[in-house]
Image (cartoon, rainbow, N blue to C red):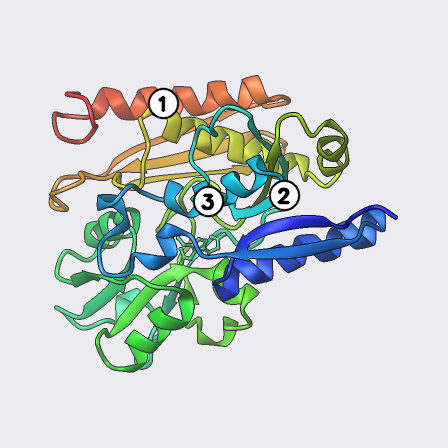
Amino acid sequence: MTAPLLIATRESRLALWQARHVQALLSRRFGLAVDLLGMTTRGDQILDRSLSKVGGKGLFVKELETALEEGRAQLAVHSLKDVPMTLPAGFVLAAVLEREDPRDAFVSGRYGRLEELPPGARVGTSSLRRVAQLAAQRPDLVIEPLRGNLDTRLRKLDEGRFDAIVLAAAGLMRLELESRIRSRFSVQAMIPCAGQGALGIEVREEAAGLRARLAELTHRPTWLAVQAERAVSRALGGSCSMPLAAFADWTPDGALQLDVALGHPEDTRQPLLRARVQGRVADDAAAVALGDAAARQVSEQARPGYLPDAG
Ligand SMILES: NCc1[nH]cc(CCC(=O)O)c1CC(=O)O
């Protein structure tokens, strides 16, 4: 009898849903016995400060990697957008599942969409990327930070602290909270962040057998799209302290189109810098080249202050 595989997972409802989703997939596809190893990460414990100020999204991933390193678990399942652009040595992204809805959702009690909000309305959101794009469309809004897991964020809305909040549609759908979505932003009006809506499975590089199996779960069109998106973040020195949006999708004739927007990290009155590139992409190298091309277009427009290094 072989010991069951273990998935290291955070214990938020969303993380557990995602881990169970992969657990069921591995059992269905390969007949594998898989258990979950629940863990609390430093990122989960920090609720009072903006994540970008205390070390970024990597906080959610690091403890899971330690569990893999110590052999307490073999897989880690992540919302791909929370996975740092470069994994530490010894770890690989072994699979990316087919992307679900990549859009951002508008959630509100009274209002159906952004355009319906009265002047000066209070909007809660957790990411600089959303702040930059909301402010570009509606400079009158009072946009305030909103953190915590999805249930916490909805509660803060329900308590009346905001007129509306903006969050990822995929997370709400996974937790059967889709009924809370009043409308979805188009991916042009609110460009998603790299990897939004996709799940990634991380393993140790040396786990060759497991990697081969997981590779079969990869959805190739999603994989290539997120490689392009992640290349943009990597090229621009991306971290979650940057208001950076990058979204790639396939056109009807089979090209990959990549849209990027970069806001000023401190001053939302500064213009959003945009790039759109398109190309035929058949492998990782071409996806990364597309991402690099978009990043170059953006950095050429960037006056001092937009990017980490002077530029
Ligand atoms: N940053 C937290 C996070 N990580 C993944 C999701 C949602 C699911 C996804 O985008 O894949 C969310 C919630 C949100 O941003 O509103």
Q: Which comes before the other along the chain, label 2 or label 3?
A: 3
Across and down, in percent, residue 52 comes to 26, 45
Q: Is mark 3 within 8 Å of ligand 1?
A: no
Mark 3 and mark 1 in contact? Answer it, CB < 8 Å.
no
Q: Is residue 176 left or right of residue 44?
A: right
Q: Nearer the viewer, residue 227 or 44?
A: 44
The answer to whether residue 158 is above or below residue 192 is below
Q: Amino acid at mark 3?
A: Glu
**Mark 3: few, some, or many residues within 10 Å (few <14, many ≥20)?**
some
Residue 252 visible? The answer is no
**Residue picked out by circle 1:** 235
Q: Is mark 2 within 8 Å of ligand 1?
A: no
Q: Nearer the viewer, residue 233 or 239?
A: 239
Across and down, in percent, residue 231 comes to 44, 26
Q: Amino acid at mark 1?
A: Ala
Marks 2/1: CA–CA distance:
27 Å
**Residue picked out by circle 3:** 63
Residue, x 55% and y 25% (percent of image)?
Answer: 90
**Residue picked out by circle 2:** 75
Q: Which comes before the other along the chain, label 2 or label 1?
A: 2
**Mark 1: few, some, or many residues within 10 Å (few <14, many ≥20)?**
some
Residue, x 58% and y 39% (percent of image)?
Answer: 68
Marks 2/3: CA–CA distance:
12 Å
Q: Amino acid at mark 2?
A: Leu
Frontmost of labels 2 and 1 is 2
